[in-house]
Image (spheres, rainbow, N blue to C red):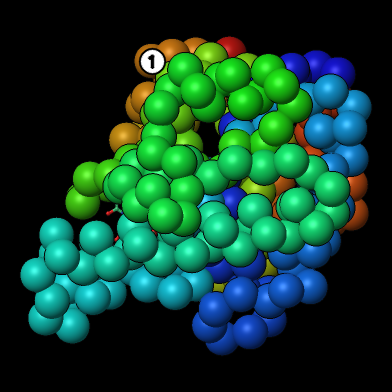
Amino acid sequence: MTYKRVLLKLSGEALMGDKPYGIDPAIVQSIAEDVSKVVDQGTQLAIVVGGGNIFRGLKGSAEGMDRATADYVGMLATVMNAITLQDGLERTGVPTRVQTAIEMQAVAEPYIRRRAIRHLEKGRVVVFGGGCGNPFFTTDTTAALRAAEINADVVFKATKVDGVYDRDPKCFPEAIRYEKLTYQEVLSKELGVMDGTAIALCKDNDIPIVVFDLFEPNNIAKAVSGQQVGSRISNNC
Ligand code: UDP
């Protein structure tokens, strides 16, 4: 095991599968099985989940909503995903706690850093819902922030794409995938892998980011053991 404590960032879209909206239970099940394999081996795993499969603040504000209000709706969407993920993980036998940045004690614990770390030490997965609790931020930035707070060894950004490319591989078939790159390259080339705030936070705290395809079987386990998957972003290539 290369990484002992991992922060896994799952986008809301990843939970959608091929559906146009919402959550595909089969995807949740398959993520839960992948997670259970690494937790069984002793990896401490925290998850930050997005909400883009349900609601995005930017889209709401583009349609006329007040931006902060729309962002709060987006944050609430992430809580739905967090609870759904907890359900899938627990049905797979993985003890899981949800902590939310916006308190809603009837459904989840509030975010308490030291308690989150204690859960991890006891082998429980912790799912962070509600983003960082503030509008104008993203769940990518939340992932970087929580990773720093819990002293994670690495951030895994598991997405639908198999790494970081020099340009959008959907539009440019000749796009080249990086195996390794620096935070500075991501920022200066404006490679849209995570937002700039998230990259800068990881850079400042020297937390490597591994970007890989969530749907490739066993990718989470491979990444935990340090095998080459996707692209690795760090201070030195
Ligand atoms: N959001 C927010 N503050 C946060 C995290 C998220 O306001 O700290 C809102 C924002 O509106 C965002 C939405 O929640 O669009 C869903 O999160 P995100 O877009 O990061 O989800 P993902 O793209 O990962 O599915």
Q: Is residue 237 above or below residue 73?
A: above
Decide if residue 96 is in sight here: yes
The answer, for residue 210, to whether it is visible in the render is: no
Q: Is residue 124 left or right of residue 79?
A: right
How packed mark 1 is, by other alpha carbons closer than 10 Å (few <14, some 14-19, many 20 or more), is few
Vertically, is 80 above or below 150?
below
Seen from the viewer's position, the closer of residues 72 and 169 is 72
- Specify whether 215 is left or right of 181: right
Q: Quadrant of ligand 1?
A: bottom left
User: Of residues 44 and 201, which is closer to you in this image?
Assistant: 44
Question: Quadrant of the image for the N terminus?
Answer: top right
Q: Residue at x 22, y 45 (%)?
A: 134
Residue 105 lies, in percent from the top left, at 39, 48
Residue holding disc 1: 204
Question: What residue is rendered at 56% in x and 58% in y?
Answer: 83
Amino acid bearing label 1: Asp
Q: Is residue 119 above or below residue 62?
A: above
